Image: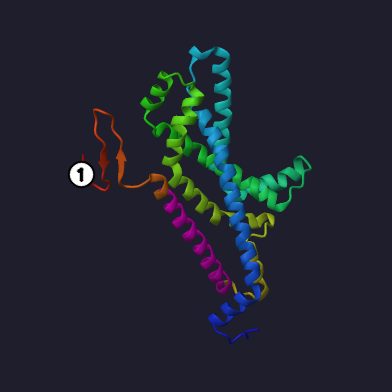
Amino acid sequence: MPTAQSGFFEWVLFFVKTYGSLFLQGAGTTLLIALTGTIVGFIIGLGVGYVRAMPCERENGLGRYYLLKVVRTLLGVYIEIFRSTPMIVQAMVIFYGMAAVFHINLPHLLAGFVIVSINTGAYLAEIVRGGIQSVDPGQQEAALAIGMTYGQSMLNVVLPQAIRNILPALGNEFVINIKDTSVLNVISVTELFFVSKSAAGTFFKYFEVFFITSCIYFVMTFTITRLLRWLEKKMDGPDNYVIHGSQSVPDVELIGRGGEHID
């Protein structure tokens, strides 16, 4: 063990050797909560954004009109509440509120999943709604014109394009969740920040420990960012591709990145 006169890097090496496995376990928990919360939050956001993007017209029936109005109002309240309060406050209210009001003692890890998922869903709901509205309305009109129902046109035409449009925002939300899971230490979720705080408090070496922690967070977020950019490029498809013609129209090769069309 280093002494009081030991230097910065001696203490860093000591913490890596002594608490390395705990740091990795904490990082694994952080990634698990962030990934699960983002996926479940995306599902919540997709459903909420879909409902909020639905046309609300009296011509479709008064019962359906008023029901949709009530549902959209309740969903709007959910979005405003969770976007207007910090996640750390939401964690305290949900975890301790469930125990005090409903006498339900959630496991710490499960509570972390629930909190991150609901919080992420509120943000992604508006992102999904914006993605749906960014798709050219003419495409849905064309789908309806060939006999598709509203649901079929959304599922097969609009949503695939909307999801592609919001993919950068979705990836950004995942990266944010990796960092924001640190607030869950207030309900004793043993993620990376909780482990780091415990190690630093044992030896009163906060700078050395959180230097290691910051490096781990950087590696995680940097790696995830690069993977998401690679995925975006894959979804974009190749720069050069061929549009096959017919008997009267020849094939056309399209050259990406500002190139010319070649017949």
**Visible in this render: residue 28?**
yes
Q: Residue at x 47, y 33 (%)?
A: 159
**Relative height, residue 217 to residue 248 (above, below):** below
Count of numbered badges drawn on the protein: 1
Horizontal and vertical percent for residue 46? 53, 36
Q: Quadrant of residue 164?
A: top left
Q: Between residues 169 and 229, which one lies in front from this camera angle?
A: 229
Residue range in magenta is: 207-232
- Residue 229 belongs to magenta span: yes
Q: Residue 260's x, y, as percent?
A: 20, 44
Quarter of the picture holding the N terminus: bottom right
Q: Which residue is drawn at 54% across and 12% down?
A: 61
Residue position marked by numbered label 1 in the rendering = 260
Residue 6, x across and y down, in percent? 58, 85
Local crowd size for mark 1, using a 10 Å CA cut-off: few (<14), some (14–19), many (≥20):
few
Please tell me whether the stretch drawn in magenta is mainly helix, strand or loop. helix
Residue, far front:
247
Residue 224 coordinates in the image, percent (x, y): 49, 56
